[in-house]
Each structure stands twice: as C-alpha cells, then as structure tokens.
Amino acid sequence: MKLEKSNLIVKRAHKEVYRTEAGIVKVFDNVYAKSDILNEALNQARVEETGLDVAKLKEMTEVDGKWALVIEEKKGMTLEEMIGPDMKNIDKYMDEFVDQQLTIHSKKAPALPKLKDKLSKQINECKDLDATQRYELLTRLASMPKHDKVCHGDFNPSNIIVAKNGKMAVIDWAHATQGNASADAAMTYLLFALKDTKAADLYLDTFCKKSDTAKQYVQKWLPIVAAAQLTKDNELEKDFLMKWIDVMDFQ
C-alpha cells in the first residue's frame, strides 16, 4: 500500500493517520510492538461485536516496513466541528453526546481488557508521581466498585462522526476496556476540562443527571484517571493534571 503525504489527516508522536480509498489507515512507528497493534485490532473487533455503530476494522497490513490498521471511514463531520461554530446550541449537542456514551456503557464485551488493570499499570508506571502518591491512588483504585461496562477511554466530541442524516458513529477505540462507567466519564470530564472548564462542567452535570449518578462518585475517579493521563507525557497537560492528583481533596 502506497500512501501520499497529501492524504495525511493526523500526525502524532509515533503514528500517522491517512485517508485512502481503502479506508482510514493508521500507521504505527516501530516503537510499537507487533503484539500491541494486534491487541488494538482485536479490541476493535470485540467492540464491533457489541452491535455499536463503529468504524469497522478491515485489515492489518504493512506500509514501508511499519504495521498499519485499515479501518472503515465514516463520512460526516466530527461533533467537535459542529459544536465549535454553534455554541449557542451546546446543551442540545451535550445531550446527544451523553446519550451516545450511555449507549456504549449499556454494552458488554467480556474479552476486552479490564479498566482497573489498565489504570493500575499506568499509575505504577507514572514517573511524575512519588511512591506515596502512587500508593494512595492504587489504594483508592482498589476500593472502587468493579463493573464490566464497555468504556471507550477517549470519549470526546472529536471521536464522534455525525452523518448528514444525523446518525452518529464512534471512532478510535484504541483505549477500549470493560469497567466502571464513572471512570470513563471522569476521563471525558478531564478531556473537556483541558480545553474548556464550562463545557466540562456542563458535561458532568448532564452525564450525572441522565445516568442518575452522584457527581461526587465521578469526582472520586478524577485523581485516578488524571494519573493515567499523565503517562502520555504531554507537557502542556502536566500542570493541569497534577492538581487533580492530590487524593486528599476528594476524601
């Protein structure tokens, strides 16, 4: 498969995403183990089997000596692109956004990795935290209820494609797990808060109302998921995330 730079959609530290006739092609640098890419492909397939409207995995291939995944392209605008110029209707968009997330949480995929296992590994590997902070966070994580709901892990408006008929499809399932829906909501809150605290607060209010979840319960997950987000080594996010790490604020 030959890729043209003019078809590049996204370039990140160790991966590139292209639009082609075959579909969306995600190319991984050689820092990724083959097994990790196979796991991502497998998790994508597991999510497909839940019946959710997602971009389907088409194949795993090689591009210039690098492994790549070819995924179905969903036509339309991202929800983020729709909200930007139409902020006066953000309440309506947020309702639809949360409804989509709750639909995801209503599904189960027993073969997906467990969210608590993933969070525990990330906290243990977080070089920005000292041993005491890691211990407190791991203790809190261990005390949180175990659930088995499908969690997207990176649920934000840029990962929702809205077709011309208004139908929504969710993309980018690289971080999919099974676990506690409120942990997934806490991650979404942080992703909003990194850009717009008002939108983050509206999201949390909407999620808690629609799911009948106490806001304090979602907030108890915030230090945990903030520590997990720190492992992405984004210097621009570090100061913001670190202020959520002090678990004593949420006792």
Image (spheres, helix red, strand yellow):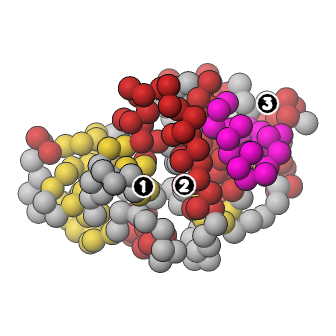
Q: Which residue is labeled 1 in the image?
A: 168
- Under mark 2, the amino acid is Gln
Task: Say what amino acid the circle numbered 1 marks.
Answer: Met
Look at the numbered disc 2 and give the secondary structure of its residue: helix
Labels 3 and 1: the sequence-earlier one: 1
Instruction: State the residue at coordinates (82%, 60%).
Output: 145
Q: Which residue is mark 2?
A: 100
| Residue type marked 3 | Asp
Q: Earlier in the sequence, mark 2 or mark 1?
A: 2
Compare residues 44 and 210 and report the one nearer the observer: 210
- Residue sticking out furthest to the right: 251
Decide: few, some or many residues near mark 2? Use Cα within 10 Å; few <14, some 14-19, many ≥20: some
Distance between the Cα atoms at labels 2 and 1?
A: 8 Å
Ranked by sequence position, the earlier of labels 3 and 2 is: 2
User: Magenta includes 207?
Assistant: yes
The image shows residue 236 at horizontal and vertical percentages of 50, 23
Q: Residue at x 68, y 62 (%)?
A: 179
Residue corresponding to mark 3: 246
**Is there CB contact under 8 Å for labels 2 and 1?**
yes
Magenta range: 201-226
